[in-house]
């Protein structure tokens, strides 16, 4: 009997944890959406429309994502 490789779910930090991270920490779209109370699809759409917190250029896209938490905090404060 062969063992199937164990699949791990991606780690998603809670909003309270996101508030304690250093400014340059990279967080996922799922974490930003959780912090904003939005579905990830809405975050992606708002980003495309130029109304979101702004993902890292190299990380934008459907499969890869990344947001600097400091940028997200500043965007939230200005919105």
Image (cartoon, helix red, strand yellow):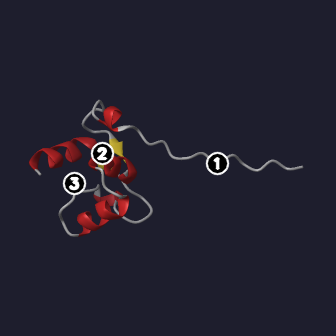
What residue is rendered at 12% in x and 44% in y? 77
Residue found farthest to the right: 1
Q: Is residue 74 above or below residue 59?
A: above
Secondary structure at numbered mark 2: helix
At a point 45% along the width and 62% down the height, the residue shown is: 63
Mark 1 neighbour class, 10 Å CA radius: few under 14, some 14 to 19, many 20 or more: few
Left-right relation of 22 to 40 = left
Whole-percent x, y for residue 20 in the image: 29, 30
Q: Are marks 1 and 2 in contact (CB under 8 Å)?
A: no
Q: Which mark is residue 7?
A: 1
Q: Name the residue under label 3.
A: 53
Q: Do the residues labelled 1 and 3 touch (CB within 8 Å)?
A: no
User: Pointer 2: what residue?
Assistant: 35
Mark 1 or 3 closer to N-term? 1
Q: How far apart are labels 1 and 2 at the CA level? A: 25 Å
State which tag comes first along the sequence, 1 or 2.
Answer: 1
Secondary structure of the residue carrying tag 1 is loop
Kindly report which numbered mark, 1 or 2, lies closer to the viewer in this rendering: 2
Please tell me whether residue 77 is drawn above or below residue 20 in the rendered image. Answer: below
Which numbered disc flags the more N-terminal residue, 3 or 2?
A: 2
Q: What SS does tag 3 mark? A: loop
Front position among marks 3 and 2: 2
| Residue at 27%, 49% in the rendered image | 36
Comparing 41 with 37, the one in front is 37
């Amino acid at each position: 009997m062969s063992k199937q490789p164990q699949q791990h779910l991606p780690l998603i930090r809670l909003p309270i944890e996101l508030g304690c991270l250093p400014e340059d920490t990279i967080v996922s779209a799922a974490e930003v959406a959780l912090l904003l109370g939005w579905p990830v699809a809405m975050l992606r759409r708002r980003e495309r429309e130029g109304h979101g917190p702004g993902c890292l250029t190299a990380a934008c896209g459907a499969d890869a994502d990344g947001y600097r938490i400091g940028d997200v905090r500043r965007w939230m404060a200005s919105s």
